[in-house]
Structure formats: C-alpha cells, structure tokens
C-alpha cells in the first residue's frame, strides 16, 4: 500500500513536469512572438511567468514540508534536495523565455530579428522546445539514455549560438549596433536556457546513478562565446 | 556546551563567507584584467574558478550530510536548505567573474573596453566588490540593515547598466559591432552578479524574519535592458 509520503512525492514529481511544460510553452510562445513581432504573444509570456514563479514557491514549500515532517535520509532526501535545484533551474528557464518576450515587446511594431537571422533564431527555438520535452520525459521516468540526447541537443544549441555570432560579426551586417546587441543577448538567453535544461537532466542522472557528470551545465562554463 | 552539529553549522557558515570572498576576489581581478588588458590576471581568474566550484561541491556534500545525520526541522532545516541556494548563487557569481575574465583574455593584447567606457565599467566593478563585501557581512551576522544597503547598491548597478547601454547606442559609437556586443554582454555579467548578491541577501533575511522579499533577485526580473 502506498503511503501519504510517497503520494506527495509523486504529486511533487507531477508538478515538476507541469512546471517544465510551462517553461517550454513560454519559450515557444516567446520565439513565435519574436519572429512574428506579435505583441499579444509577448505580453502573454510576460503575464504567464507569474504562474511559473508561483509554482516554484509552492514546490519549495511542499518540498520543505516533506523534509521537515518526514525527515527522509539517503535517496529520499537526495530526491527532495534535487527537487529544490530543479525548481530553481526551471524558474530560471521561464525567466529566460520572459527576457526573449521582452525583446519582442520592446521592438514592436518592428521585428527584432532581421530576415537573414530568422532561420538560426527559429532553430534555437526549436532546439529549446525539443530539449524541454526531453527534460519532462527524464523527470517522469529518470531515463538516463534521454539525458545523453539532451547533452547532444545542448551541443546543437552551442553550434547555433556560434553561427548566430558569425552572422552578427559578418562584414555584411547592415542592421546597426542596437540590433546586433539585441541578437547577441537573445543568443545568450537561448544558450542559457539550454544550459539549465542540461543541468536538470544531470541532476536527475545523479539521483539515478550517484555520479555527477563532469561540469555543471547550469553554470554555463563550457560555452562561449 | 556546543555540540558537533552546531560546530559543523558554524564551519559551514565560515566556508560560505570564504566562498563569498573568493567570488569577490574573482570579480575584482577580472575587472582589473579587463581594464588593463592583463592576460595573467585573466588566466588567474580562470584557473581559480575551480576552487570556487570545489567549495560548492564540498558545501553541498556537508550540508547534505548534516541534513541526513541530524534530521533538523524548523529554522535549522531552513538554514541548511538556504545554504544550498546560497552556494548555487555564489558559484554562479564566480562564473560571471570568469566570463568577464574570458572577454579580457579573448581580446588580449587589445583592451576590450574603449576609453570612454572605462569609467562606467570600473564603477560596475567597484559596486560588485562593495556588494560582495556586504554580502559576506550579512552571512556572518544576518544583518538585515545591511541587506537594505545591498538592495540600494543593486539599484546603482542597474543605473550603471543603463548608462553603459546609452553609451553603446550613442551615435558617437565608433568601435564597431564586435566591441558593442562585448560590452553589452559584460554589462549583463555585472548586472547578473549583483542580482545574485541580492538573492543571497534576501535568502538570509528570509531566515531571519520568515518573510521573503517581493521578487526574487537572482531571477533578474526587475532589471532591464
């Protein structure tokens, strides 16, 4: 028979998956708002971010309550400590989507992304979405194989980030300094989003295997530029 | 008589203060390396970052061990949970100093900061250092008054960040796209560094008062551009 403790642990897991999907939807909407100059879409990401923040506060409180009431040890405690790290990463992913949406809003009615950069930005948005879908699956099932695929997608994001910078620094760049700065910051938001996704996956692998991967993805260390 | 539990809690607190000073020294050296085009200084920040990372791993392990062995509740548990958040913020501050150092290294033997931006970047470095000194004091003594001063310094950092962007986007900007992107990203590193410092202070105020401040500084939400 299941006990209340494990029921609540499952419920927390479900909320983590829900939070992951919210962070994914936010970045998907932010990317579309950015590429289409869609003010309403951007505003929606901004207003929906409060739900992600509220979910973080709720999950932190519930995790703390379980720690306090149940005094878990070993793997159970590790799962709860990891949950605290995961909600921090997921909230930050929501914030990065928010930053993307704010660039779209700031440039409205113009479109922040020049035509020759649409492809690379669109691909960064697709990789972000694919990453977050995989992260949700990893949280559901602690699937270590999928965690490896997440690392590979993070490499794709880094490659897109480098490509973006190559285009920005090309002698053919005609869109001025402000636009270049917008795009450089946007590139960083997507890259950091991917780093946090990898961080989430690594934390879960750590619970499953007891071994932390080399490097801490959410610190963004291996990545340039 | 003190028990082993509280001795270890004190030792963890001392390590947190040490980690704060390492994050401060890193940003101070990174700023100097950036302004002086000092390759050795930049390299030192890069190599010293492993010590900050190691301290995070050590502090996480010790905090987890205390949770597991002592099964604390209420304020004691909150202090340990908060410690996990603080080490994450402090490690990230070290990473942001590392990013600053890497810009200095990437542009060597040139100096990444054009003459007319030296003042504002130098001031950002000074505010960062002042912030981190106050954060160390707050960690030592849980001084809520000092936490308010930290919020005020974060406002100064935001003002400097806006000033930097005004200079970058001035029609008089003659240093090209690459330099503008460097400076925009540098501005973001300093601003995020300050956000994490505020996040640390807010977490400690929360322990002392049980009330979380409005907004979560480390999420960087209130700040533009």
Image (spheres, coloured by chain):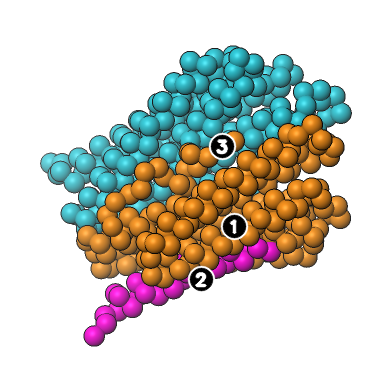
Chain colours: A orange, B cyan
Q: Is residue A13 magenta?
A: yes
Query: Which class describes the residues within 10 Å of circle 1: few (<14), some (14-19), or many (20+)?
Result: many
Q: Position of residue B127 (x, y in %)?
A: 57, 28
Question: Mark 1 — residue?
Answer: A127
**Which chain is disc 2 placed on?**
A
Judging by the rendered image, the residue that carries numbered circle 3 is: A224
Residue B221 in the magenta stretch? The answer is: no
What residue do we see at 60% from left, 14% from top? B109
Q: Chain of mark 3?
A: A
Identify the mark nearer the N-term, 2 or 1: 2
User: Could you say where residue B218 lies in the image, as x and y percent from the top left?
Assistant: 53, 46
Q: Is the same chain shared between marks 2 and 1?
A: yes
Structural crowding at the residue carrying mark 3, measured as other residues with C-alpha within 10 Å and reported as few (<14), some (14–19) or many (≥20): few
Name the image quarter holding the N terminus of chain B.
Answer: top left
The residue marked by circle 1 belongs to what chain? Answer: A
Q: Report the residue marked by disc 2.
A: A18
Q: Quadrant of residue B125?
A: top right
Quarter of the picture containing the C terminus of chain B is top right
Relative vertical location of residue B90 with respect to residue A56 in this rendering, above or below: above
Across and down, in percent, residue B86 comes to: 41, 44
Secondary structure of the residue carrying numbered label 2: helix
Task: Give how far across and how far down residue B42 sits, in percent.
Answer: 50, 21
Question: Who is closer to the viewer here, B169 or B70?
Answer: B169
Dots 2, 1 in contact, CB < 8 A: no
Local SS, label 3: loop
Question: Is residue B152 visible to the viewer in this orientation of the structure?
Answer: no
């Amino acid at each position: 028979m299941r006990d209340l403790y494990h029921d609540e642990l499952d419920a927390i897991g479900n909320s983590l998956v829900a939070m992951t999907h919210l962070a994914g939807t936010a970045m998907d909407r932010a990317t579309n708002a950015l590429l289409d100059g869609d003010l309403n879409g951007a505003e929606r990401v901004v207003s929906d971010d409060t739900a992600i923040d509220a979910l973080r506060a709720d999950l932190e409180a519930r995790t703390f309550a379980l720690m306090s009431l149940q005094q878990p040890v070993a793997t159970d405690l590790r799962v709860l400590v990891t949950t605290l790290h995961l909600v921090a990463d997921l909230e930050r992913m929501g914030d990065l989507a928010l930053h993307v949406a704010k660039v779209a809003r700031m440039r409205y009615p113009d479109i922040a992304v020049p035509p020759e950069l649409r492809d690379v930005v669109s691909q960064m948005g697709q990789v972000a979405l694919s990453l977050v879908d995989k992260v949700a699956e990893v949280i559901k099932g602690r699937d270590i194989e999928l965690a490896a695929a997440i690392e590979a997608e993070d490499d794709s994001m880094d490659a897109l980030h480098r490509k973006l910078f190559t285009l920005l620094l090309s002698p053919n760049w005609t869109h001025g300094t402000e636009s270049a700065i917008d795009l450089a910051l946007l590139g960083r938001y997507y890259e950091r989003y991917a780093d946090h996704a990898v961080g989430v996956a690594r934390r879960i692998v750590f619970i499953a295997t007891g071994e932390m991967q080399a490097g801490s993805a959410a610190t963004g260390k291996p990545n340039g530029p």
